[in-house]
Amino acid sequence: MVSQSLKQAFVGIVGAENVMDAEADKHSYSYDAAVLDPVLPALVVRPSEMDQVGRIVKLCNDNGLPLTVRGAGSNLSGGTIPSKGGIVLLSNALNKILEVNEEDMYAVVQTGAITAKFAAAVAAKGLFYPPDPGSQAVSTLGGNVAENAGGLRGLKYGVTKDYVMGVNFFDVEGNYCKSGSKTVKCVTGLNIPQLMVGSEGTLAVMSEFILKLVPPPQAAKSMMAIFPDIMTASRTVSAIIAAKVVPCTLEFMDNFTIGAVEGFAKVGLPTDAGSLLLIEVDGHPAQVAEEAEKVEAICKANGCTRIQVAKDAVERNKVWEARRAALSSLARLRPTTVLEDATVPRSKIPAMMQALDKIAKEYKLTIGTFGHAGDGNLHPTILCDRRDKEEFHRVEKGVDAIFEAALGLDGTLSGEHGIGLAKSRWMEKETNRASVLFSKRIKAAVDPKNVLNPGKILGE
């Protein structure tokens, strides 16, 4: 609950049209893409100028109001649910691309810029921004940095943190702070930009980023390798990497996911396949030709029954259309979709797949699995109906078992979706108590009133 005088203070900063407290507005910003209970904020505010952001942050801190920054709300870990109520700050009007420097290959961009639009803008200048989360058509760069988002190209090109050269932000008292540099090398002071990446808005309100750009690959070749079962495909992933070939993309689908995608997207996938790998190599044309030939040979030597190489851009796009449709295709089968983000060393993918099969049987769950096999980042996706309490209880047990399995295989809770609310209780299990306490001391030092996105990553 926010008093009328406090509401008027926000109106004084951004104008009445950008302060929303109607029930419909509050419900609209009470949830994100995670399967978690919604929490209504007291107010939703939408700044359009950077100086307004600092004043909003200061006002929240002065009054002890929880503040949750929201881009597109497409995150899958509950990072933008206003779990303590308070204020939701919408960043979508702060979306300017301030600079694209072709000579020094960087860009300066505001937090609310849409990822795909930014990538297209730099591509028009002959440059390449590789991070490509599945939600890139709607997700914001601020959200990508906050959650350290990944994408299909993560195996070769890394994730968002690998492209953040600088972060400008407002501290909890509303002061504007700068960190990082436009230079290739910068070792000045604490590595604040990387501290901000993945912090999910718990340490500051990020406003602008300096992002590294790279030259685009000269050529690329995509292929689809079809396998009789999951294990042969899983072993092939390790064999490709062991042969010193690093594709830009090496994706995996199990039989259930293949059927779901074909039933929805109709792209001609082999529904009788046990599993398939979608592979793309890129770089210099000669290197691409050599690596594609080597990948084909490795697939065939490891049990691949058929391999289809895209002949042109149309066929290449069809391959990636299939992969990008995986989550939406699965989601249409049942009312509730619980997508997890467990990640293991890629040599342990076969063991993780065996664990997932065991979990599905033990808890009587329908699990479709796809993901970034090349970097061990699997997305076991449980299809269920949350309204069925007995079924959802089994789902929760199954999710716990998935995390246990991943950690037991030297894996991690998240490869690209962050921790948010969904996984905070597991933090100590992956790291240790001292590590969590160290992180909490950092949070307490920069946000002593616990105003900034409280409850996320580290729990209470």
Image (spheres, rainbow, N blue to C red):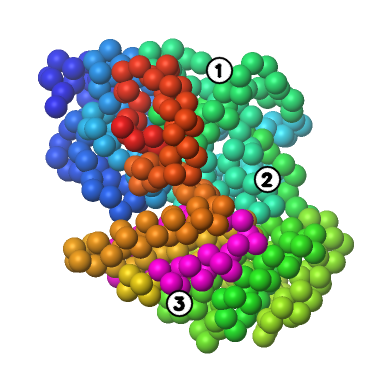
Precedes in sequence: disc 3 or disc 1: 1
Mark 3 Cα within 10 Å, few/some/many (few <14, many 20+)?
A: some
Q: In this rendering, does residue 94 appear at all?
A: no
Labels in figure, total: 3
Q: Do the residues labelled 3 and 1 touch (CB within 8 Å)?
A: no
Amino acid carrying mark 2 in the image: Phe
Quadrant of image for the C terminus:
top left
Mark whose residue sits in front, 3 or 2: 3
Magenta-colored span: 330-359
Precedes in sequence: disc 3 or disc 2: 2
Mark whose residue sits in front, 3 or 1: 3
Residue 256: assigned label: 3
Estimate the x, y position of residue 11 in percent, counting from the top left.
Answer: 23, 20
Q: In this rendering, does residue 216 appear at all?
A: yes
Q: Tell me what residue is drawn at x 83 percent, y 56 percent.
A: 284
**Badge 2 is on which residue?**
128
Q: In this view, does 161 lie above or below 86?
A: below
3D distance between C-alphas at marks 3 and 1: 48 Å
Residue 178: assigned label: 1
Which residue is nearer to you in this view: 162 or 108? 162
Which residue is nearer to you in this view: 182 or 39? 39
SS of the residue under disc 1: loop
SS of the residue under disc 3: helix
Residue 452: assigned label: none
Which residue is nearer to you in this view: 287 or 230? 230
Q: Residue furthest right?
A: 286
SS of the residue under disc 2: loop
Rendered image quadrant of residue 372? bottom right
Precedes in sequence: disc 1 or disc 2: 2
